Image (cartoon, helix red, strand yellow):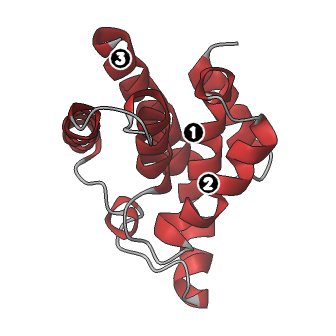
Amino acid sequence: MDRAEKALSYFDNKFNCAQSVLTAFADESGLSEDDSLRVSCAFGGGMGRQQHTCGAVTGAAMALGLRFGKGKNDEEEKKQQTYNLTVELFDEFTKLNGSTNCRELLNNLNMRDDKDLELINVQNLFHTNCRKYVADAVRIAENIIAKSA
């Protein structure tokens, strides 16, 4: 099973987009799968279902941060490198999907509104759209990591 398939397996088993993406990178992040699931939980649905930045994108950004980010005793350059890689992630995701904004990615439907949530479910957007976003975010992060390592 490749990393995108692993992320989709989490997503299909009731974990949110951020959890699914970050946890697909748990093996190399230094976090356990359970810690990855917990730390990323609040980022689903564009930050607690507020539909800001897509959780798949924030999960991938967390994976980049764990791999390249500036820690307590690291050089300042690591912070700038991580920022640059995050911009690349956002740019690539936007090229593929038109936006990184959760609401825009879900046809401007508000998942905190009962009627809109019903439309999201009727249109099967969590399955059709969000699964694609999860796989895209994983693949973009993998490519960034591979060329930056």
Where residue 109 sits, quadrant-wise, is: bottom left
Q: Earlier in the sequence, mark 2 or mark 1?
A: 1
Tell me the element at label 3.
helix
Q: Which residue sits at x=59%, y=28%? A: 29
Question: Is 118 placed left or right of 111 in the picture?
Answer: right
Mark 3 surroundings within 10 Å by alpha-carbon count, few (fewer than 14), some (14 through 19), many (20 or more)? few
Local crowd size for mark 2, using a 10 Å CA cut-off: few (<14), some (14–19), many (≥20): many
The picture places residue 77, in percent across and down from the top left corner, at 21, 32
Judge by depth and name the residue closer to the eye, 90 or 1. 90
Would you call the spot at circle 1 few (<14 residues within 10 Å), some (14-19), or many (20 or more)?
Answer: many
Above/below status of 107 relative to 12: below
User: What is the secondary structure assignment of the residue under circle 1?
Assistant: helix
Give the alpha-carbon distance from disc 2 to disc 3, as whole Å: 21 Å
Asked if the residue at tag 1 contacts the one at tag 2, i.e. Cβ–Cβ closer than 8 Å, the answer is: yes
Residue type at mark 1: give it.
Answer: Val
Query: Residue 143, which numbered label?
Result: 3
The residue tagged 2 is: 40
The alpha-carbon separation of the residues under discs 3 and 1 comes to 14 Å
Q: Which mark is residue 73?
A: none
* Mark 2 or mark 3: whose residue is earlier in sequence: 2
**Real-space Cα separation, disc 2 to disc 1, in angstroms:** 9 Å
Mark 2 or mark 3, whichever is nearer to me: 2
Instruction: Please state which of the two labelled residues, at mark 2 or mark 1, is closer to the viewer.
Output: 2
